[in-house]
């Protein structure tokens, strides 16, 4: 694991758990970027679809109306996936910045994942 030194005094471990009682998966790392990438790698297409559908008007083809996300996916799946990956990369960058600002015991929620910061120095005393 990479060690992220905060304020030059201690290191933090970030724990990421999906907020669902039926999913027991937990991811821990001391690198905020790794935690953010874990979240975006496990997100489905719904977040990207919602963004596309909010940003663009419905598409009309021969009198039939389609949501922008469906139209892009059906017309050019490669462009859809490239756009989704770029969008999720930008989300990961923003998440990593916010995770880096967490203090010991702080929690933040991203798309159903709860990230908790823990001061590693306190764990050594136990």
Image (cartoon, helix red, strand yellow):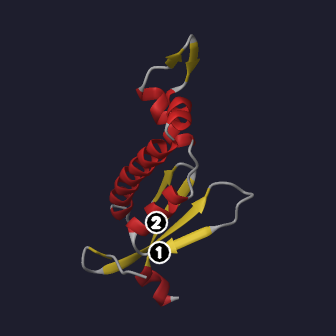
Q: Residue at x 48, y 42 (%)?
A: 80
Q: CA distance from mark 2 to mark 1?
A: 6 Å
Is residue 105 at all visible to an observer of this figure? no
Q: Position of residue 94 (x, y in %)?
A: 35, 52
Q: Few, some or many C-alpha atoms within 10 Å of disc 1 (few <14, some 14-19, many ≥20)?
A: some
Nearer to us in this view, 120 or 77: 77
Using the rendered view, name the quadrant where residue 1 is placed. Answer: bottom left
Precedes in sequence: disc 2 or disc 1: 1
Farthest residue in the top direction?
63
Q: Position of residue 109 (x, y in %)?
A: 50, 52
Callouts 2 and 1 close, C-beta under 8 Å: yes
Give the vertical position of 19 relative to 105 (above or below).
above
Q: Position of residue 108 (x, y in %)?
A: 47, 55
Farthest residue in the bottom direction?
125
Farthest residue in the right direction?
22
- Secondary structure, mark 1, is strand
Give the vertical position of 68 relative to 93 (above or below).
above
Nearer to us in this view, 22 or 43: 43
- Secondary structure, mark 2, is helix
Q: Few, some or many C-alpha atoms within 10 Å of disc 2 (few <14, some 14-19, many ≥20)?
A: many
Q: Residue at x 43, y 81 (%)?
A: 120
Give the vertical position of 53 relative to 94 (above or below).
above
User: What label sits on residue 29 in the rendered view?
Assistant: 1
Q: Look at mark 2 in the image and give the residue it sits on.
A: 35
User: What label sits on residue 42 in the rendered view?
Assistant: none
Number of marks: 2
Q: Residue at x 52, y 59 (%)?
A: 41
Q: Position of residue 32 (x, y in %)?
A: 39, 67
Give the vertical position of 87 relative to 11 (above or below).
above
């Amino acid at each position: 694991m990479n060690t992220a030194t905060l304020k030059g005094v201690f290191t933090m471990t970030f724990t990421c758990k999906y907020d669902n009682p039926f999913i027991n998966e937990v991811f821990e790392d001391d690198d905020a970027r790794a935690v953010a990438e874990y979240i975006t790698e496990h997100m489905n297409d719904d977040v990207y679809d919602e963004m596309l559908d909010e940003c663009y008007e419905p598409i009309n083809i021969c009198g039939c109306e389609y949501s922008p996300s469906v139209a892009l996916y059906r017309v050019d799946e490669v462009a859809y996936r490239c756009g989704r990956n770029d969008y999720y990369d930008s989300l990961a960058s923003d998440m990593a910045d916010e995770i880096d600002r967490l203090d010991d015991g702080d929690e933040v929620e991203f798309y159903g994942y709860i990230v908790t910061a823990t001061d590693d120095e306190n764990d050594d005393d136990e």
